[in-house]
Image (cartoon, grey):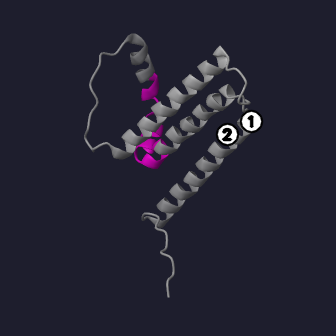
Amino acid sequence: MALGDQISGRDLILISGGLFRLAKRTFEIHDKLEREAGHASARVGANFAEVVIQIMLFACRPVGEFVHERPTLKILALSSLLLIAVSPVAEGLEFAIPMGYIYFAMGFSVFVEMLTLWLRERAAQPLKLRERYTP
């Protein structure tokens, strides 16, 4: 988009929606990293759709436990959503990001995280980086 080009309604919707998702994901990541342990959110009444979704999710208990025990996976998932939220903002500014780049970045991140998890479990201790050598 050049400086003198007009912004269409579609562009405004894409930009505002993408910025909203960027802000929401950023706050979610911040909440996961900074929230005190034991802090519970306010309880709200469940509707029928939420109950059905929860029952279907109950079948996914092993996956949920796996992710719950590994908080870095939560951050990875939220970061992936953050990356996806950039796409409509760029499209609204008429800068197309090929989805292959986004999928590659997400796939590479998952690959690195899986290697890290595998090394941690194999070593039976937290992964530690070595300090820089100083003579």
- Whether the residues at callouts 2 and 1 have beta carbons within 8 Å, the answer is yes
Q: Position of residue 120 (x, y in %)?
A: 48, 61
For the N terminus, give its image quadrant.
top right
Q: Is residue 42 visible?
A: yes
> Residue at 66% across / 16% down in the picture?
10
Query: Which quarter of the figure has residue 17?
Result: top right
The part of the chain drawn in magenta is: 56-74
Work out whether 18 lies above or below 62: above
At which x and y percent is residue 50? 41, 17
Q: Is residue 39 left or right of residue 71?
A: left
Does the magenta portion include 70? yes
Instruction: Find disc 1 in the rendering and name its residue.
Output: 98
Amino acid found under the numbered disc labelled 2: Ile
Q: Which mark is residue 102?
A: 2
Q: Quadrant of residue 43?
A: top left
Residue at 39% across, 11% down: 48
Q: Horizontally, is 49 left or right of 81 in the view?
A: left
Secondary structure beneath dot 2 equals helix
Asked if residue 112 lies left or right of residue 69, the reply is right
Could you tell me the amino acid type at mark 1? Answer: Pro
Q: Secondary structure at mark 1?
A: loop
Q: Nearer the viewer, residue 38 or 105?
A: 105
Tell me how far mark 2 sits from mark 1, CA to CA.
7 Å
Dominant SS of magenta comes to helix
**In the rendering, which numbered label is found on residue 80?**
none
* Residue 41 image point, x, y percent: 29, 30
Closer to the camera in the image, 62 or 130: 130
- Which residue, as the protein is rendered here, is positioned at the far top? 48
Residue toward you, 130 or 89: 89
